[in-house]
Image (cartoon, rainbow, N blue to C red):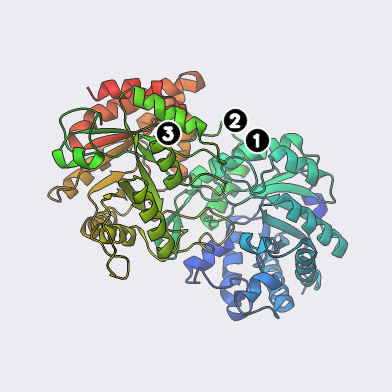
Amino acid sequence: MSGPSKPSAGSLLSGERVLVCDGAMGTMLHAAGAALDRSLPELNLSDPGLVATIHDSYLIAGADIIQANTFGANRLWLADHGFPDKVAEINRAGVRLARAAADRSGRGVLVAGSVSPAVTAPQRRRVGAAERMEVLREQIGALVADGAADLLILETFGYLDELVEAVSVAASVTSLPLIAQATFADDAHTLGGETPREVAAVLSALPVAMIGTNCTIGPQRMLVVAEDLVRYSAVPVSAQPNAGQPRRTGPRSFEFAIDGGYFSRYLTRFADAGVTLVGGCCGTTPTHIRAVAEALRAQPQPAGQPQPPASVAAAVRVEEPSAAGLGSGSLADHLSSGRFVVAAAITPPDAGYAGDAERTASLLADRGIGLVFVQPRENARTHIDSLSMALALQERVGVETCPTVTTWDKTIMSLQADLLGAHALGIRSVVATTGSPPVLGDYPAVDGTWEVDSVGLTALLAGLNAGRDSNGLALTSRTSFCLGARVNPGARDHGAELARARAKIRAGAHYLVCRPVYELDALTRLVEALDGTGVPLLLSVAPLTSFEEADYLAHEVPGVTIPGSALDAMERAGRSGARAVGLELAAALLAKARPLVGGVILAAPGDDPAALAPLLEALG
């Protein structure tokens, strides 16, 4: 049965009006019970009714384009789940389900075949260009075989060379319009290191109807990328951000925090910036798409030029009142004696250059801060790990360091080896955290190693202190780590967060480090709940540096609360006064919070230790 008449895909993609694409398919399938580690495209065969229902929900929400459930439906990805011989069957079924839903809508809806990179990041090292192109040729051939697709979206390509290969293959197989979307990290570079300008220059010269970006980052950071793509592209531009950062809620479960109002507010700014196709990626739902469609139908908002938030190094740790900074004695000494601890946070720089971090640590030491908490970088860029950075600072600058050790990317054996080596080289304080892998596509945990979480790592460290390994076997000597664990005062489920904090204490944590907070209520509630545990709480303080950063934290980062008064103050301050206002807000909070906690970990705005002066004054 033929569907309702509609303009050609080429005319709709010309950029004359803003189109709304659908949101995440994987997020919706996971929410309906599909396991994170299963093949989602295979559901086109085993549960077509579920896939069709999700298509219908996006169409009811107002989507102009829906994407077939075919992301990752190529031979190599499907082989990992036992379906390498079902490429044609799965892709054809996916397009047919989407076409049927479009026809049921009674509107001129376009159906897009979704094409992912031929390989995952680990496979890239083993599979050459010729095989990658052949794998895509097979999938694309299946997508266009029945004539039900109106266009193809090549999405979530982290490497420009692979996206160029995909465009070349698609153009040789079909004359359907092509949308080529690259994915960028927080630093506005692809995983391969290309800038938006470089991506736009290369893709605009290829036979594509539209270029764009999707996945990995939320709307605020993606807006900066999209503006550059519009600036340098010779063809229309698309953008489909994630619903912020995922929050790990279980061994294999995640949730996203951004609501429809915030999401639509930013996507109207995408449209104001010249983006002509907007939609959602990981974490987005029909609620987000409905909000976007309604906002675009309403009066357009004025164009804006938000700046990316300054990178925030976060981390603070400490115990009981009295005294001042960590002039002498170890962190363990200060905690056991009840002296108030003043520490600083440093995040390892990108790539392998440690000079800037060493200079910052040296300047901090000159100002009387002799304890540095080294935070891990939470992106997919090459960088020094926190343990190595902590060792370098301790050896070259002479400060005491406390690295944060994450568990998601290491086995128990490698964690033990790293920690024993760090202890042998002088590291005596550690913060254990589970961490989250960088988001790389519709399966945020696909490449993670989850042998142990933060509670398990704390127990492992306590075992090393007792002279036994993870299997209970005796070691020739004991370690003497001062053990810290993370706690989030702003967690959505306060009861669950408190229960987990108590589990970390039972596992052996000597102190807790809370995430940066920007209001006192959540911190007070946490301190009261922990009363009687005898475990010090160290407060992390990371002053806001811009309204954009405050807006981003408030809406895109799970578990962070920014009071409306703080948002208003940062917005009124403008770009020239925002940093000073952010320091004033942090100092005011710190003065009130000091009696509640055992110490603080200060993050210097712009890695400028001189900027900490107002905070040190607030500590008295």
Residue 298, can we see it?
A: no
* Front position in the image: 346 or 308: 346
**Residue at 71% from the left image edge and 64% from the top image edge:** 118
Quadrant of the image occupied by residue 66:
bottom right
* Front position in the image: 198 or 357: 357
Quadrant of the image occupied by residue 140:
bottom right
Amino acid on which disc 1 is placed: Asp
Decide: few, some or many residues near mark 2? Use Cα within 10 Å; few <14, some 14-19, many ≥20.
few
Contact flag, marks 2 and 1 (Cβ < 8 Å):
yes
Q: Earlier in the sequence, mark 3 or mark 1?
A: 1
Residue 300, relative to residue 287: is it above or below?
Answer: above
Secondary structure beneath label 3? helix
Amino acid on which disc 3 is placed: Arg
Contact flag, marks 3 and 1 (Cβ < 8 Å):
no
Q: Position of residue 69 (x, y in %)?
A: 64, 67
According to the image, label 1 marks what residue? 272
Residue 168, relative to residue 348: is it above or below?
Answer: below
Decide: few, some or many residues near mark 3? Use Cα within 10 Å; few <14, some 14-19, many ≥20.
few
Numbered mark located on residue 304 in the image? 2
Q: Earlier in the sequence, mark 2 or mark 3?
A: 2
Secondary structure beneath label 2? loop
Residue 117 horizontal side relative to residue 374, left or right: right
Residue 278 horizontal side relative to residue 547, left or right: right
According to the image, label 3 marks what residue? 396
Residue 253, can we see it?
A: yes
* Front position in the image: 257 or 321: 321
In the displayed orientation, state which residue is furthest to the top.
576
CA–CA distance in space, label 2 to label 1: 8 Å
Secondary structure beneath label 1? helix
Q: Earlier in the sequence, mark 2 or mark 1?
A: 1
Foreground disc of the pair 3, 1 = 3
In the displayed orientation, state which residue is furthest to the front.
476
